[in-house]
Image: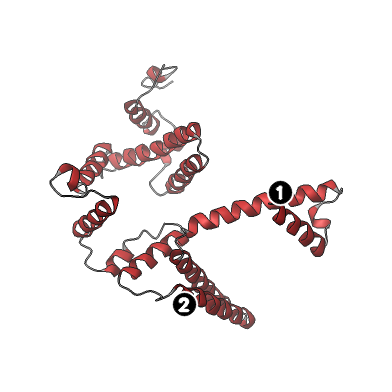
Amino acid sequence: MNKNAKKYVNKERYTVEDLYDIVRILRGEDGCPWDREQTHKSIRRDLIEECYEVIEGIDNDDPVLMCEELGDLLLQVVFHAQIGTEDGQFDMGDVADGICRKLVLRHPHVFGDVDADTSEKVLENWDKIKKEEKQRLSLADEMYAIPPALPALMRANKVGKKSGKANFDFPTDKEAFDKVTEELSELYEAHLQGDKEHIADEMGDLLFSVVNVSRKVGVEPEEALTRATEKFMKRFKLLEEEAAKSGRNLADLTPKEADILWERIKNHD
């Protein structure tokens, strides 16, 4: 056993400082081979997955799951900070210092003498300070600052909101809806032509136009698609169960039989 690890075996209660030290031990000379091999990029996906698992706990109103998954997410933060320390780039102290400075700077109504008695005013001040801090001089600069790694629907929605600030938007909701119909028609034409690149372009245009409608009607597209997917999965499970009641597999049903069952489940739901 690693001599520095002994004190962490069967400890009654661990602290954040213990987490820092445990990660250092795992990354150290006598630590874990897998942990030592990791880089910022190799654990990038883990960070994304842990974020979504925290969100699952929030959506399910499950504090036990939230606590566990927040721990996993915190591990990712500490892990990246340790790699940064080893590379001489930054350490956990730099991470904490940076976020504390940002919070103080962007809350002048708390740490200064600026008036902001509503959430709307707070957000207005936050955006103004952020623009000055990042030296984003135009809305295009703000668009390009939206992380490309965001889920595509979420990113498209943010881009649409930015363009809307410059009044570059559909004047009416109906025109946004009409654009979806137009893009769907263009996608079908591309499909008939059989050009994969053209089909991909038109599919993107259709999805972007749907996101614009979602923004117009005040619905977060990422959340809406998640709900629709969950609904489909629930109904599909019931469809399989209904088929099994008659001693058949779902694949054995004719399309018409499956449609009849699906409509029955949908109407009941």
Q: Nearer the viewer, mark 2 or mark 1?
A: 2
| Residue at 46 percent of width and 77 percent of height | 175
Looking at the image, is 244 positioned above or below residue 143? above
The image position of residue 162, as x and y in percent, is: 33, 66
The image position of residue 151, as x and y in percent, is: 46, 57
Question: Upstream in the sequence, badge 2 or badge 1?
Answer: 2
Give how far apart the Cα atoms at labels 2 and 1 are. 38 Å
- Looking at the image, residue 252 sits to the left or right of residue 209; the answer is right
| Residue at 52 percent of width and 72 percent of height | 206
| Residue at 48 percent of width and 75 percent of height | 174
Amino acid bearing label 2? Glu
The image position of residue 61, as x and y in percent, is: 50, 38
| Residue at 24 percent of width and 69 percent of height | 138
The image position of residue 205, as x and y in percent, is: 49, 73
Residue 19: mark: none
Residue annotated with mark 2:
175
Element marked by disc 2:
helix
Element marked by disc 1:
helix
Residue annotated with mark 1:
237
Displayed quadrant of residue 27:
top left
* Front residue of this view, candidates 168 and 25: 168
Give the tally of numbered discs: 2
Amino acid bearing label 1? Lys
Displayed quadrant of residue 90:
top left
